[in-house]
Amino acid sequence: MKNLSLRIRSIVLALVALLVFMPATVVTLDRAYTSSLMQAKLSELRLMGLALVSAFELDGEIPVMPELLYEEQLNLPDSGYIGMIAFRGKVVWQSASALNFPIQSPPPAPAIGEEAFHASFQPGFDSAHRYFSYVFTAEFAGDERFEPVHFYILNDKSAFDRERDTFLSTVWRGMLLLTAGLLVLLVIGMNVVLSPVRKLIDDIRNTARGRQDSLSRTYPSEFDGLKTSINQLINAEAEQRTRYKNSLGDLAHSLKTPLAVAMGARPLASEAKDALTQIDALIQRQLKRATAGQHSWQVAMPVAPTLRKVIAAMEKVHRQAALTIYNDCDNDCTFKGDKTDLLEILGNVLDNACKAATSAVWVKAACVSNWTVLVVEDDGPGISEEDKQRLLQRGERLDSYADGHGIGMAVVSDLLAIYGGLLRIDKSQHGGACIEIKLPAA
């Protein structure tokens, strides 16, 4: 049961408990009810036996009984009740209800003044049914001495068994309905109890996907410690990320100064200048890779405002080219990452498209599942199959684009690899290049 949910565990345990509880309850109720019926039956048969005793007379050595008895059930044939009297080992009288049952020999009888009750007795005259048997032995005065007389009451158990079976059926139906009701209440109760857990899970999932920056809902007091710990973890990660980024920024600034001094020295050979330029670009790229990345507790940011800012900047930078930049971005597009990384990606891709374009650049962004798909097209000369691979190589530049294009696209490729995104270069329907980028949205 280690991998089962709390709801399933609770239901399984409840079912096991009910499977044990139900039969035990039914057995207990059956025993109590049967015992109660037995006591009632014994009292009934005892009263009928005493009625026989009160009606019996011994005239010398001749037993005398009235034709009709006070107990009406002993006067009716096939009533299920049979009365008989044994004297000196022989049946000397039997009730009218035993008309169809010739009784040859009586069952065993107790001592004088005692009674015997048997819950299941099989008489020889009726093999199809079992009977209750009640026997009482009394003593009557004869001519010479007191004589023992045995009074028998037999009762067919069929009605008793039917009544007991009806009771058991009713109890089982009631227990099944009770079990179903308890299970329904259990499921409802589990949903109510686990509702805060589901809310907490949703909050954690939304925070991990960047839809919120902390756990802000109100939970039961049992979850206060967990909520506080998770929020502290989120804040600690954000602070650590900020310190790490600031440290790398300080490192970049420290490296730029001596590089600028070295590049400004005179005289400086062209080979040395190119080497220093490439070192500077390489440092910037590696620092960007070190600070970039998707974090578990990062809030997703909208793409449209950042894209509009980048497009506005590109229109200013390339205003002499009289380019038209068409923007078709869904407002619900998001990017789960750092804003500077998004600016770096959009800036490099749009800058390269503007450099290559003849008259226009087309930008389109849409949400597909958990991704934001960005497509940038231009009407420039396009990119050959060979140059598509070179474009993503570190430090490679294409002559059809301005200086710096290779490093920029390589940085874009690095950032997308860090974020788990995708980059595809194809031919545009407008004649130039088509750059398709997939960014994580959540």
Image: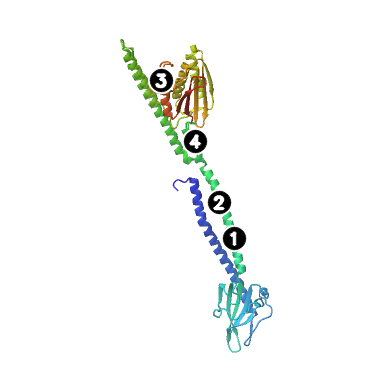
Picture coordinates of residue 166, whole percent (x, y): 61, 62
> Residue pushed farthest front?
385
Q: Amino acid at mark 3?
A: Gly
Picture coordinates of residue 46, whole percent (x, y): 60, 74
- Give the numbered dot on residue 406: 3
Q: Amino acid at mark 2?
A: Leu
Tell which circle, 3 or 2, labels the residue nearer the N-terminal end.
2
Q: In this rendered view, identify the residue nearer to me: 60 or 92.
A: 92
Q: Secondary structure at mark 3?
A: helix
**CA neighbours of label 1 inside 10 A, class few (<14), some (14 to 19), many (20+):** few
Q: Amino acid at mark 4?
A: Asp
Name the residue that disc number 1 marks: 169
Name the residue that disc number 2 marks: 182
Nearest-to-viewer mark from 3 and 1: 3
In the rendered image, which quarter is residue 40 located in? bottom right
Q: Residue at x 42, y 26 (%)?
A: 415
Tell which circle, 3 or 1, labels the residue nearer the N-terminal end.
1
Q: Is residue 302 visible?
A: no
Q: Residue at x 64, y 83 (%)?
A: 57
Tell which circle, 3 or 4, labels the residue nearer the N-terminal end.
4
Q: How is the image coloured?
A: rainbow
Q: Amino acid at mark 1?
A: Ser
Q: Is residue 209 above or below residue 96?
A: above
Real-space Cα separation, disc 1 to disc 2, in angstroms: 20 Å
Q: Is residue 182 above or below residue 257?
A: below
Name the residue that disc number 4 marks: 203
Picture coordinates of residue 424, whole percent (x, y): 46, 26
**CA neighbours of label 3 inside 10 A, class few (<14), some (14 to 19), many (20+):** many
